[in-house]
Image: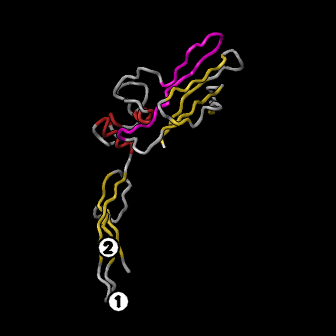
Amino acid sequence: MPYSITYNGSQNAPNAAGNYSVVGTISADTVNSNWNSVSTTSSLTIYDPVSSWRQSTYGTSSNSGNASDTASPYGIGLNNLQAYTFGVDPTQPVTVPLLSISNSGSNALTLSFLARAAGPGPGYSGLTRYYNLEATTNLTNASWAPVSGYSNILGSNQIISLSTNASIGPKWFYRLKAWLK
């Protein structure tokens, strides 16, 4: 029994974000005259969270110009994809560092960050933000590893802090990693 499926009139399945009209047709069976052609129409929505965020932030879903993933048009120190991932508005100055370091006295340092929830805004629907605090002792051949107890942290708008003694052992370098899933 021959059949066809089209997406906005094309037989090629779409992969770009957007809304598509889907038509499925089963053609009449030429051998068995008891069959008639049947067709049904539905819709398909492909959701691209970053495109939705771009649309909300820049007024376009296109990955180009100021809205490009790699652009940093407002000079906040993060490109757009990083700003999206960390939940930072790229059109506003960053007034609080993503990862803070402070002297806690007697060679003690405290690193802290706000583990932001993904939130309900455009581009974040159904997503959860996670964090790793990572460290290395060598920036030349950096092999970053999560700090024990500071990996896969679920962002729920809580402050995360790590206190460490700066006078023990080798020098340590830290970074903050975030991702959405």
> Residue 8, labelled with which disc?
none
**Does residue 1 lie above or below 46 as drawn?**
below
Q: Categorize mark 1 by other alpha carbons within 10 Å: few (<14), some (14-19), many (20+).
A: few
Q: Residue at x 58, y 13 (%)?
A: 103
> Magenta region: which residues?
98-122
When asked about the image quadrant of residue 145, the answer is: top right
Q: Nearer the viewer, residue 126 or 40?
A: 126
Please say whether residue 22 is one of the residues in the magenta stretch: no
Helix, strand or loop status at disc 2: strand
Q: Amino acid at mark 2?
A: Thr
Residue type at mark 1: give it. Asn
* Secondary structure found at label 1: loop
Compared with 177, 172 (above or below) is above
State left or right for residue 78 relative to residue 6. Answer: right
Where residue 73 sits in the image (x, y, percent)?
A: 35, 28
Vertical relation: 107 (above or below) 31: above
Q: Is residue 86 or residue 16 the one in the foreground? A: 86
Residue that badge 1 annotates: 32
Location of residue 63 by image quarter: top left
What's the coloring here?
secondary structure
Q: Quadrant of the N terminus?
A: bottom left
**CA separation in Å, label 1 and label 2:** 17 Å
Which residue sits furthest top?
Answer: 106
Residue 104 falls inside the magenta stretch: yes
Q: Quadrant of residue 13?
A: bottom left
Label 2 CA crowd tier, 10 Å (few <14, some 14–19, many 20+): some
Residue 163 in picture, x, y percent from top left: 62, 20
Q: Residue at x 66, y 16 (%)?
A: 166
Residue 78, image x and y in percent? 43, 29
Please tell me which of labels 1 and 2 falls first in the chain.
2
Residue 25: mark: 2
Q: Give me the residue at 40% from left, 41% from top.
A: 124
